[in-house]
Image (spheres, helix red, strand yellow):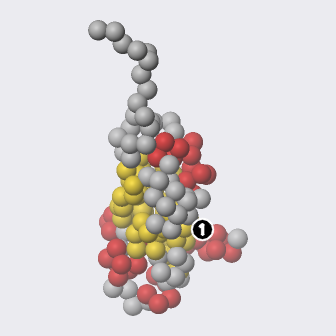
Amino acid sequence: MTSLVVVLASLLLLVATGWSRDDAAADTVEYRLTEESPTGTVVGDLLHDVPSLADDEHQQRLHFSIVTSRTTSSAATNHVLAQFTIGERDGRLVTSSPVNRERACTLQRDVTDCVIRLDVAVRPLAVFRLIRVAVIILDINDHAPVFSSTRYIL
């Protein structure tokens, strides 16, 4: 509960101090993950992949936490949040269970991209950042084709 209050207060502080769109663009990262990757698969390393964090003098004291998540299908949002964890100290984003593309993007099965978007808060307040992470789930052909008829006569 305390961390939620800190994150919300930090977001309000950003709005009040005029956080610009340029800052938001700088703290955006995109990763690709093959669906059904095993539990514990490293998706990315935010500490090293976000340029503004890589050269931050406060690196030793940073804390990472996932604040929000959403997909191209809003129906699966609660399920998706449980799919990833982030190392509080090292910023490594890993899978906490295999990600099923069809379940994550249930309403739009014909869509070419299934994207899971996460907002990751980086604290302490002195260096607060909100990193936008896009995880593109790559499809594996794990479903046999379905035909309307079992036999065809030519």
Instruction: Assign a secondary structure to mark 1.
Output: helix
Counting labels gives 1
- Residue 103, percent from left and from top: 53, 44
Asked whether 28 or 100 is in front, the reply is 100
Q: Give the side of residue 147 with respect to residue 69, left or right.
A: left
- Classify 10 Å Cα crowding around label 1: few (below 14), some (14-19), many (20 and above): few
- Residue 24, percent from left and from top: 38, 65
Q: Residue furthest right?
A: 1
| Residue drawn at 37 percent across, 68 percent down | 27
| Residue drawn at 47 percent across, 81 percent down | 90
Asked whether 19 or 48 is in front, the reply is 48
Residue 11 shows in this picture: no
- Quadrant of the rendered structure where residue 149 is? top left
Tell me the kind of residue under disc 1: Leu
Asked whether 147 or 117 is in front, the reply is 147
- Residue 105, percent from left and from top: 48, 43
Q: Residue furthest top?
A: 154
Quadrant for the C terminus, please.
top left
- Quadrant of the rendered structure where residue 117 is? bottom left
| Residue drawn at 36 percent across, 61 percent down | 31
Q: Give the side of residue 57 with respect to residue 70, left or right.
A: left
- Residue 50, percent from left and from top: 35, 74
Quadrant for the N terminus, please.
bottom right
Q: Give the side of residue 6 with respect to residue 11, left or right.
A: right
Residue 48, above or below 35 = below
Residue 141 shows in this picture: yes
Residue 32, above or below 51 = above
Which residue matches tag 1?
A: 8
